[in-house]
């Protein structure tokens, strides 16, 4: 029997809010995401694994910061274009 989309949405919303209401859950989840992002950038800056771990980590952090800055720039441009007054 097909599930009503509205009921499925409400069930998912309840489950998500229950999960995030647990003490420490946001921090644990955030730590996993941050570690995965950093590991991805380590693979990007040193795909062959030839750099020293400290150097690879430093380059990965800069790569991650560059990606975040690019996303911030794109967001700023999008917001500016939405609020620009037509001439």
Image: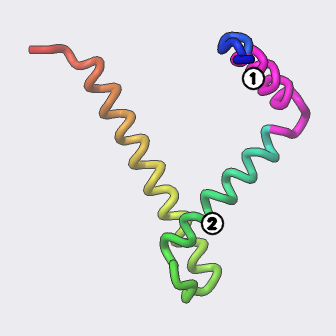
Residue ID at (74%, 20%):
13
Looking at the image, which residue sits at the far left?
87
Disc 2 is placed on an element classified as: helix
Residue 72, labelled with which disc? none
**Is residue 13 in the magenta section?**
yes
Quarter-of-image position of residue 10: top right
Residue 29 on image: x %, y %: 77, 45
Looking at the image, which residue sits at the far right?
23
Above-or-below relation of 14 to 73: above
Residue 12, labelled with which disc? 1
Residue ID at (75%, 51%):
31
Query: Which of labels 2 and 1 is toward the front?
Result: 1
The CA distance from mark 2 to mark 1 is 30 Å
The answer to which of 19 and 85 lies nearer the viewer is 19
Residue ID at (55%, 89%):
50
Residue ID at (80%, 23%):
17
* Disc nearer the start of the sequence (2/1): 1
Residue 23 on image: x %, y %: 90, 34
Disc 1 is placed on an element classified as: helix
**Is residue 47 in the magenta section?**
no
Dot 1 alpha-carbon crowd within 10 angstroms: few under 14, some 14 to 19, many 20 or more? few
Dot 2 alpha-carbon crowd within 10 angstroms: few under 14, some 14 to 19, many 20 or more? some
84 with respect to 69 (left or right): left
Quarter-of-image position of residue 51: bottom right
Residue 5 on image: x %, y %: 65, 14
Image quadrant for the C terminus?
Answer: top left
Above-or-below relation of 1 to 28: above
Image quadrant for the N terminus?
Answer: top right
Residues rendered magenta in the picture: 8-25
Label 2 sits on residue = 39
Quarter-of-image position of residue 16: top right
67 with respect to 73 (left or right): right
């Amino acid at each position: 029997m097909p599930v009503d989309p509205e009921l499925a949405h409400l069930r998912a919303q309840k489950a998500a809010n229950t999960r995030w209401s647990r003490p420490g859950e946001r921090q644990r989840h955030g730590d996993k995401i941050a570690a995965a992002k950093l590991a991805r950038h380590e693979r990007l800056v040193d795909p062959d694994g030839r750099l020293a771990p400290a150097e690879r980590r430093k380059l990965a952090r800069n790569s991650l910061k560059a990606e975040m800055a690019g996303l911030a720039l794109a967001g700023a441009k999008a917001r500016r274009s939405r609020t620009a007054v037509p001439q």
